[in-house]
Image (spheres, helix red, strand yellow):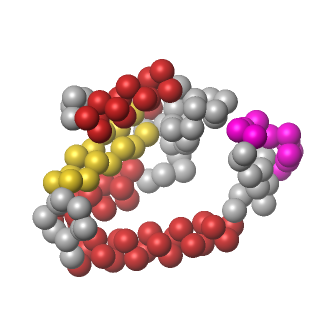
Amino acid sequence: MWWDNEARERAIGPPYAYPRYPVHAVGALLRLSFAVQDNAARKAPAVRNILLVNNDADGAISNGATAAFGESWARNGASVRSYTFPAELNLDHDVIDPNHPKQRIDLVYPVLIGLIEGTHP
């Protein structure tokens, strides 16, 4: 399946991005996410500190599902922090890739670095 059925190979994106929707990879990712969800509900995570980063403008990800993972991990002993980029920033799904045509690394990177270093709330 094409990401953009009309543009096909001409779709805007980094030159290394695959122009089609990787259905088999999504299936593998779903299996992995179900395993993680099951483990999160039953036992402590392998790490003690977890940082969840969400993007309120991203319609491809469920922030509620992410919060549920965090709650499960917290119930099993992890220290869970979260940060959500506000919707009004209008960030695209891929907030990390500096080559993404809609990237806003001027806004995203300082926040992520601050979160990692513990200097951003």
- Quadrant location of residue 117? top left
Image quadrant in which the N terminus is located: bottom right
Residue 88 position in % (x across, y down): 45, 26
- Quadrant location of residue 53? top left
Q: In the image, is 57 to the left or to the right of 12?
A: left
For image coordinates 47% across by 72% down, the residue present is 32
Residue 50 position in % (x across, y down): 25, 53
* Residue 70 visible at all: yes
Image quadrant in which the C terminus is located: top left
- In the displayed structure, 77 sits above or below 117; it is below
Q: In the image, is 59 to the left or to the right of 108?
A: right
Residue 13 position in % (x across, y down): 72, 38
Residue 79 position in % (x across, y down): 16, 54
For image coordinates 24% across by 68% down, the residue present is 45
Confirm whether the magenta stretch covers residue 13: yes
Tell me which segment is drawn in magenta.
5-15
Comparing 56 with 107, the one in front is 107
* Residue 88 visible at all: no
Comparing 70 with 79, the one in front is 79
